[in-house]
Image (cartoon, grey):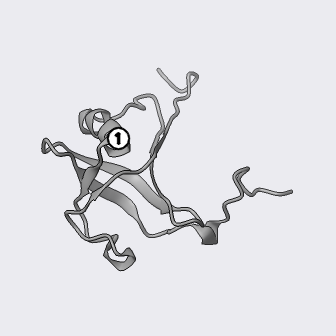
Amino acid sequence: MNLRPSNGWKPRDTVKSLRKFRFVTGDGIKFRADFVARDPGGNWTAIETKTGSGAELTPGQTEGYPQLRTVGAFVDTRKLAAYGIAIGANVRMPVEVDLWSCPKCAN
């Protein structure tokens, strides 16, 4: 059985260590992405996953993710320094959000 994602990514193609990645918008709103990954072409994507009965974005994520996609947000961590992106750099990137809840799990 082939378990590779349909887009052709393999685990070794992504940057694995960038969890809980912090950003700050131009208006000072802080938010955190669950993951930031780089595809084989060098393009970065923020990935947010929410699960459970209370699967919702935080207020900071609700404000921050649209800005990260359009005008950019400031990197608030040193985790990308090894890849040439310094803390305080303004970056723009696509955002993938997976909001999932289990209707049968809610009580």
Quarter where residue 82 is shown: bottom left
Tell whether 33 sits left or right of 102.
Answer: left
Residue at image location 17% in from the left, 42% down from the top: 29
Q: Residue at x 45, y 28 (%)?
A: 53
Disc 1 element? helix
Q: Position of residue 46 (x, y in %)?
A: 43, 51
The residue at the far front in this view is 71
Q: Is residue 34 left or right of residue 78?
A: right
Camera-side residue of 53 and 84: 84
Location of the N terminus (image quadrant): bottom right
**Which kind of residue does numbered mark 1 sit on?**
Thr
Location of residue 48 in the rendering, given as x and y in whole percent from the top left corner: 44, 45
Task: Examine the rendered structure and indicate whether residue 17 appears above or below residue 103.
Answer: below
On the image, numbered disc 1 is attached to which residue? 70
Farthest-out residue, right: 1
Residue at image point 41% right, 65% down: 18
Residue 2 image position (x, y, % from top left): 83, 57
Q: Residues within 10 Å of mark 1 (few under 14, many from 20)?
A: few
Q: Residue at x 60, y 67 (%)?
A: 40
Where is 87 relative to 59, above or below? below
Q: Please provide percent x and percent y for residue 23.
A: 26, 53
Does residue 82 lie above or below 38 as drawn?
below
